[in-house]
Image (cartoon, rainbow, N blue to C red):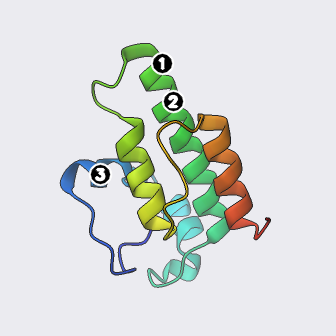
């Protein structure tokens, strides 16, 4: 979901948040244009981050922080987009708005 080549280190648990299961070649090609794994489609990355945020939020609302935690999700996001702006007390809507604005150079 987020590139591992930005020099940041995530622990194993955080890496689980960064994982996206690709089911077919089309999705891989969408994430990496022309199958070049050094290129990243930022629009598709944004779509994946938004979807993952909803997955984490829904899971926490249903099961509590038994597997997914907001803290680990935010660690992945803050590390991946190289910021420390997002905090645990931020709502998921605030988090999504921030991610959207960051990817679209707003604010």
**Residue 78 in the image: x percent, y percent?**
47, 60
Query: Could you tell which of marks 3 and 2 lies nearer the N-terminus?
Result: 3
- The numbered disc on residue 61 is 1
Label 3: how many Cα within 10 Å (few below 14, some 14–19, many 20+): some
Q: Which residue is mark 2?
A: 57
Query: Could you tell which of marks 1 and 3 lies nearer the N-terminus?
Result: 3
Q: Which sits in the foreground, 71 or 53?
A: 71
Label 1: how many Cα within 10 Å (few below 14, some 14–19, many 20+): few
Residue 67 versus residue 31 in the image, above or below: above
**Residues under numbered marks 1 and 2 in contact, where contact means CB atoms less than 8 Å apart:** yes
- Asked which secondary structure carries label 3, the reply is helix
Q: Which sits in the foreground, 91 or 59?
A: 91
Q: Which residue is mark 3?
A: 14
Quadrant of the drawing holding the C terminus? bottom right
Query: Looking at the image, which residue is at 58% across and 42% down?
Result: 51
Marks 3/2: CA–CA distance: 16 Å
- Asked which secondary structure carries label 1, the reply is helix
Marks 1/3: CA–CA distance: 19 Å
**Residue 98 in the image: x percent, y percent?**
67, 53
Quarter of the figure with residue 2: bottom left
**Residues under numbered marks 3 and 2 in contact, where contact means CB atoms less than 8 Å apart:** no
């Amino acid at each position: 979901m987020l590139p591992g080549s930005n020099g940041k280190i995530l622990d194993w648990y955080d890496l689980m948040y960064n994982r996206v299961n690709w089911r077919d070649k089309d999705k891989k090609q969408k994430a990496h244009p022309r199958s070049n794994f050094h290129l990243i489609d930022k629009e598709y990355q944004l779509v994946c981050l938004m979807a993952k945020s909803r997955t984490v939020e829904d899971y926490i609302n249903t099961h509590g922080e038994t597997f997914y935690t907001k803290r680990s999700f935010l660690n992945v996001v803050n590390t991946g987009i190289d910021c420390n702006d997002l905090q645990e007390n931020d709502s998921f809507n605030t988090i999504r708005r921030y991610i959207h604005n960051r990817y679209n150079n707003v604010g």
